[in-house]
Amino acid sequence: MAEIRLQQVSKRYTGKSGDVDALRPLDLQIADGEFITMLGPSGCGKTTLLSIIVGILPPTTGQVLVDGKDLTRADPRNRDMAMVFQNYALYAAKTVRGNLEFPLRMHGVGTTERRRRVSELAEMLGLTSVMSHYPRQLSGGQQQRVALGRALIRRPELFLMDEPLSNLDAKLRLQMRTEIKRLHREFGITTIYVTHDQSEAMALSDRVVVMNRGTVAQVGTPEAIYRYPADQFVADFVGMPPMNIMPVSLRSAGREVECVTGNGRVAARLRPDALPTEAEGHLGVRPSHVRWTRRPPDAAAPWLPATVRQVDPMGEDTLIYALQEGEPVTIMEREPCSVRPGEEIHVAFPAEAAHLFVGGTRQALASDVTAPAASGALATAPAGTAAGTAGTVAGPPGRPGAGAGQR
């Protein structure tokens, strides 16, 4: 297995229209045997970073260290790494057995040992019955298992996966996600997984690296990323449905900060560690934490009038889409819901569930109880960008599922 350390790694492209920073200088340490996911939208730099690690792309600056050895300029063939791509890249003229055997042949593994490893891995991956089949005769899930097996069979120090499940349907993606997690437990190979699918990142990872515009926005455990987003981008990108985020004016009230809507109503009263110097901010609350009622029980409490626009039953959950002073508000209701489009309701954003984002970079303002630091070393971002730590975060938003609507 391997420990990976990236030091001030960046990638800049120079063209006729000027320089483009695909990846800005960043540091990241990946522990031996860890499963870490690079998560972010298209163009954020995650695949560029993966390509630098495996040696497909040279970095503009920085070093790639594997177990302390500098591999920054090493040929990909001299890096003990295996990669699985989005398109599987199987050899069409070879059978499943031939595809699985190929890496071992290239490394000079003897016939007896080669057959033993292929047989063991085929049984583990459920491929025994299709060993004589060609890729064109396999389903998408079978092709993906062959691609995984071909990468795993030579037992590399580092296993890299670039959007490996994006070509599969939803049910098969879930099955393969379970399979990948099981294989990681079995082999314990240090794994770097690239995806734009947050559900994959949250389900698979020991830690998640959220990337945005070539920088690291935050690094942490899936729970820390979800509960304590470091900035507004992370809060909006991670979570489905997305976090409710509304612009507010900030008003000091002793140790508290009042978040005031455009109509002068108080949406929430928060108690941050330090009072913000900004006059404006953005208030964020996850849909599962928004409370709603037809008749507010306490007129003095910060209940805001809203109009229901749409109600979507989602099985066990119901999503209520409303407008509050022209701002969209999504509510996730976990009980049978009788509200209808056009109804007037009141919504509340509990202080214990709220996040406050301030400043030009819209960083989260830490509250009285800050999030614990994520285990392991954390990424850092260059000065002036979003901090890559789970420590610069908002306070805990209460237990999952809190905030069911009152009737």
Image (tube, rainbow, N blue to C red):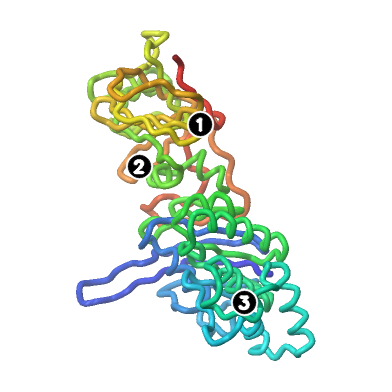
Disc 1 element:
loop
Tell me the residue that label 2 is attached to: 362
Closer to the camera: disc 1 or disc 3?
A: 3
Disc 2 element:
loop
Q: Which callout, 3 or 2, points at the residue further toward the start of the chain?
A: 3
Mark 3: which amino acid?
Arg
Badge 2 density bin: few <14, some 14–19, many ≥20, Cα 10 Å: some
Figure check: 235 above or below 91:
above
Residue 26: x and y, percent? 46, 62
Residue 252: x and y, percent? 34, 22
Q: Residue at x 47, y 35 (%)?
A: 366
Give the Cα separation between the discs numbered 1 and 3. Answer: 43 Å
Query: Is 257 on the left-hand or right-hand side of 87?
Result: left
Note whether residue 63 is visible. Answer: no
Mark 1: which amino acid?
Pro
Disc 3 element:
helix
Q: Are marks 1 and 2 in contact (CB under 8 Å)?
A: no
Closer to the camera: disc 1 or disc 2?
A: 1
Towards the viewer: 95 or 247 = 95
Tell me the residue that label 3 is attached to: 150
Viewport quadrant of the N terminus: bottom right
- The part of the image, by quadrant, that contains residue 212 is bottom left
Query: Is 206 on the left-hand or right-hand side of 300?
Result: right
Tell me the residue that label 1 is attached to: 397
